[in-house]
Image (spheres, grey):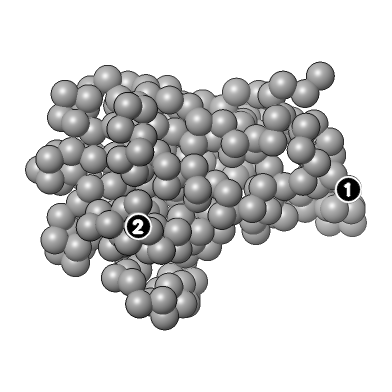
Amino acid sequence: MRLANKRALVTGGASGIGYAIVERFLKEGAAVVFCDIATEATERAEKALSAGGGKVRGVIADVTKSAECKKAVDEAVRFLGGLDILVNNAGIDVKGTVAEISEEDWERQIAVNLGGVYRMSKYALPEIIKAGGGAVVNMGSIAAFLGYSRLAAYGASKGAVVQLTRNMAVDFAKHNVRVNSVNPGVVDTPLLEHACKAIAGPNGDWQAAKRDYLAGQLLPRAAQPSEIAAAVLYLASDEAGFVTGSAFMIDGGYQIQG
């Protein structure tokens, strides 16, 4: 029970990596509020997660909207009685070079992946400080460190999240708040399938596009969401009490492959 008596808020928690994080946190003794923009998926996730007997609540929130972020934090504090952990996991993936992508899609990408971290942290950090300190884990990506074709906005947003994490670590260490980023490589989620299909085109072989992604790794498979959740658990727990400002890589050896 590595998170016994801890109270956590997880964004983008209705599916994929976010769902795996909520599920693992509950198993480790935390009480959790998760938010997501998808109403039906949030309702399904809350029902499934509640079946395990843990204290969990799903709320609808768009992380691009300040009022909804504040409402999500307020609901978490009310339901949980305070807040110790924030996981900024919500994210989207918009394809295109800077010449192709529309201004609207560019702004949306930055608003979710980077702006969502800012807005949720803005309202959650005072509550974590009020509780005596805790942990923030931001979801970066291997795309923050490497260049990928037609991922200009996504890579820019994730690179900014990694740097924002460092700045937050500096600003809040005096309040006993640790801030770290987790940076996955290829993970077997619906987002991966969506990305591969976008690359392959309507008549292309998206499984071939997936194999191309995996070809650059030392470990020849996609990560499971539970493996990313395990890293988030570590950084959120007291076991990582001397870790802050780090960019934790979970990429199957992608960066060191020759």
State the count of labels. 2
Q: Nearer the viewer, residue 25 or 165?
A: 25
SS at badge 2: loop
Say which amino acid is labelled 1.
Answer: Ala
* Quadrant of the image occupied by residue 35: bottom left
Q: Nearer the viewer, residue 39 or 166?
A: 166
The residue under the point 51% across, 59% down is: 20
Give percent across and percent down for residue 182. 49, 36
Label number found at residue 1: 2
Label number found at residue 256: none
Q: Is residue 256 above or below residue 131?
A: above
The quarter of the picture where the C terminus appears is top right
Q: Nearer the viewer, residue 124 or 3?
A: 3
The residue under the point 72% across, 21% down is: 256
Say which amino acid is labelled 2.
Answer: Met
Instruction: Point out the residue furthest to the left here.
Output: 130
Q: Nearer the viewer, residue 131 or 139?
A: 131
Residue located beneath label 1 in the image = 208
Q: Is residue 53 above or below residue 103?
A: below
Q: Is residue 127 left or right of residue 221?
A: left
The quarter of the picture where the N terminus appears is bottom left
The residue under the point 52% across, 62% down is: 15
Give percent across and percent down for residue 201. 83, 50
* Quadrant of the image occupied by residue 59: bottom left
Q: Is residue 183 left or right of residue 160?
A: right
